[in-house]
Amino acid sequence: MNRLQGKPWLVLAVASGANFLTVLDLWVVSIAYPELERAFAPTTLSDVSWILNVYAILLAAFLIPAGRLADGIGRRTCFLAGLVLFGVASLGCALAPALSVLIAARAVKAMAAAMLMPTSLGFVLSAFPSQQRSMAVGIWAAVGAVAASSGPVLGGLLMTLSWRWIFLINVPLVVVAAILGALCLPGGDARVRRRIDGFGAILISLAMGLGCTALVEAREWPPWRTWSALGAGLLLAVGFVVHVRRHPEPIVSPALFGVQRFRSGACGIFAYYVGFSGMLLGSTLLLTDAWHFSVLRAALAIAPGPMTASIVSPFAGRIAGRLGPRNVVFTGALIFAMAAAWPLAMARTSPAYTLVLLPSLLLWGIANGLLQPTLFATADAVPREELASASAVLTMARQLGSAFGVAVLVSVLGTDPGAGLGGLRRAWVVVLFTAVLTAFSQGDRSWIRTFSSSWSSRPTSAPAKSRRSM
């Protein structure tokens, strides 16, 4: 028997490494647009932007089918196959002779990432005992936060060699992760043999693909095209809901949303990530457009937020055991609201990083460290055989929230956010609103009373509740 197999901390390391790769790949190309435009000339910035767009759109579209696939064939098989496919596609990106080939390879990477994201979270949840799960999910989420913050910085450093290195760097990392995964990831996880719900997979993929495409392209498309794509995506989503309620073995079980804790977690993740993308976009535009920081300097200036989140996240589980998950979400949402209110009140056109933005980023990091682990840990409320599918739903909520947040923020910022602070102030108002929605997404009208009583009672241990009753 392999002595490394099933070791919780090794499993967490491999799962977090995969999470790092998939999140990093979403952000690392953002700084490479000008160089890629020159490398594949004659081309336009709009054409080059599809290197990022196709990844974001297809990742959202394929998460749920990939989650159901993992539940059917086993998380280990799906995870290792996704890693291999991700590595091959990364090599294809690095060697791409034309922009069309690069975009096609990015599309393959997105489908591989869709296989990795829900399975990696599923491994973390199943590898640890209940009292350590929130801490483990906190570390998993913290690694994702570090990947998001380090993406532009790492991309800028690798660009000093060649744009191809931003893709080639994945290959040795994937090889190491695949070897460690083959050695330590447990097999024999619950598999449920079902008929393939092909029609459901098509419906949800098209609905998510159309919706995300419309949101991503809203800045470039005329309004009629954006609304047509959104309307078509909404109709397909309604058709998907009708389909899963009638199908005997649907691609997403409606019973998942009968679990109140999981349902609240999905709503909370969507609401929070609308604000998350708004905070990131607003902070970036304040630095680059209003204060005229370079892209690399701006990336370094934003880094304290995600780095603070990486410090706080591992402790979110312990705090949730003391206050309760709902109260942790409320506390995190309140701090997130403060993070948006600070620059709303203090912003100025002249650079004042330590006065205006740094306090906001530190507050945001604390909020992020509390919210992400607590909300993603709600996947643990569903039956074991549905774990990958539940993780896929939560990850899809993150992708949709991010895309929706960018679309909303662009619409309120105006055509030239650097010309004044009016657009940025409207953006921070939107972030404030999403913080309120995140707090109320938990669906517990007594949260004010329970939050207050939890401080006064000062329990010495977590209440003995069933994890499905939370």
Image (cartoon, rainbow, N blue to C red):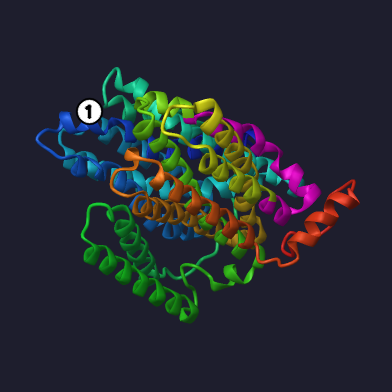
The residue sitting at 59% across, 48% down in the picture is 337
User: In terms of secondary structure, what is the magenta stretch mainly?
Assistant: helix
Q: Is 317 colored magenta in this rendering?
A: yes
> Tag 1, which secondary structure?
helix
Quarter of the image for residue 391 reads: bottom right
At a point 25% along the width and 45% down the height, the residue shown is 50
* Pick the front one: 427 or 336: 427
Is 7 situated above or below 233? above
Q: Is residue 195 visible?
A: yes
Between residue 181 and residue 52, name the one nearer to us: 52
Total number of numbered discs in the rendering: 1
Asked if residue 96 is positioned above or below residue 463 in the image, the reply reads above
The residue depicted at 35 percent of the width and 47 percent of the height is: 110
Q: Residues within 10 Å of mark 1 (few under 14, many from 20)?
A: some
- Mark 1: which amino acid? Glu
Query: According to the image, label 1 marks what residue?
Result: 35
Q: Residue at x 9, y 35 (%)?
A: 42
97 sits to left or right of 367: left
In the figure, is residue 215 to the left or right of 323?
left
Q: Which segment did they paint magenta? A: 302-330
- Residue at the extreme top of the image, as rendered: 161
Residue 269: image location, x then y, percent = 55, 55
Q: Looking at the rendering, which quadrant does residue 418 occupy?
A: top left
Split into 4 quadrants, where in the image is the N terminus?
Answer: top right
